[in-house]
Image (cartoon, rainbow, N blue to C red):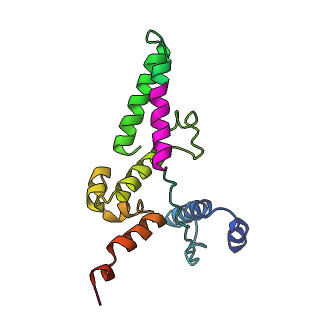
């Protein structure tokens, strides 16, 4: 068993966890069915921690480029074609996704290099609300999170915003000598 675990140690942590969980379930079942007298994996303790990876947020300019591209496509298409209806649908979906915090199809035409998924839009929505000084409790409610801890994942620190806050709101600003 130790040799197998050593062999898979260079794989991704999620893969290793899945393999170990499968082995544990199998050996527990075999022990339950009295096909094994001792469970070889019961004494092995493994603690694997995954690095938390924050999603990438879009900037205001990138979001504006995506929205502009969606609306530009509507004005380019002839109103009697299927393409026109498709472009209206795309713009509507983008607006709905962004208003709820979530797009991929227009991002390439808007020349946004980042991988844009519905979650990227959701993350960007929350990040931009935070940058505009919206209280995190309101963002939690808008995103439908039951725990504030889940919402705090979206609180990517913007260095420029941090400098601005320190310059504008530092308590020392109110104290004079």
Residue drawn at 43 percent across, 12 percent down: 79
127 in the magenta segment: no
Left or right: residue 127 compared with residue 42: left
Segment colored magenta: 59-72
Chief secondary structure of the magenta portion: helix
Count of marks overlaid on the render:
0
Residue 112 appears at what percent x and percent y?
Answer: 57, 42
Question: Is residue 170 something that shows in the picture?
Answer: yes
Q: Nearer the viewer, residue 75 or 37?
A: 75
100 w.r.t. 82: above or below: below
Question: Is residue 103 something that shows in the picture?
Answer: no
Left or right: residue 133 compared with residue 161: left
Residue drawn at 38 percent across, 64 percent down: 152
Residue 81 appears at what percent x and percent y?
Answer: 48, 11
Give the quarter of the image for residue 96: top left
Residue drawn at 49 percent across, 17 percent down: 77
Quarter in which the C terminus is drawn: bottom left
Q: Nearer the viewer, residue 56 or 148?
A: 56
67 in the magenta segment: yes
- Which residue is outermost to the bottom? 177
Q: Nearer the viewer, residue 17 or 43?
A: 17
Residue drawn at 57 percent across, 45 percent down: 115
- Which residue is outermost to the top? 80
Quarter in which the N terminus is drawn: bottom right
128 w.r.t. 95: above or below: below
Residue 72 appears at what percent x and percent y?
Answer: 48, 26
Residue 111 appears at what percent x and percent y?
Answer: 59, 38
């Amino acid at each position: 068993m130790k040799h197998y675990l050593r062999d898979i140690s260079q794989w991704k942590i999620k893969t290793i966890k899945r393999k170990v969980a499968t082995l544990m379930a199998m050996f527990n079942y075999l022990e339950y069915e009295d096909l094994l007298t001792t469970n070889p994996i019961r004494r092995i303790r493994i603690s694997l921690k995954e690095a938390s990876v924050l999603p990438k947020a879009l900037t205001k300019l990138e979001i504006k480029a995506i929205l502009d591209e969606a609306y530009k496509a509507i004005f380019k298409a002839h109103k009697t074609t299927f393409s026109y209806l498709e472009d209206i649908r795309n713009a509507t979906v983008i607006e709905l996704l962004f208003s709820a915090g979530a797009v991929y199809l227009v991002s390439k035409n808007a020349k946004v290099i980042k991988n844009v998924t519905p979650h990227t839009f959701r993350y960007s929505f929350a990040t931009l609300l935070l940058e505009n000084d919206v209280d995190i409790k309101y963002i939690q409610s808008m995103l439908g999170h039951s725990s504030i801890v889940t919402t705090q994942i979206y609180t990517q620190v913007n260095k420029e915003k941090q400098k601005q806050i320190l310059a504008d709101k530092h308590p020392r600003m109110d104290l004079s000598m």
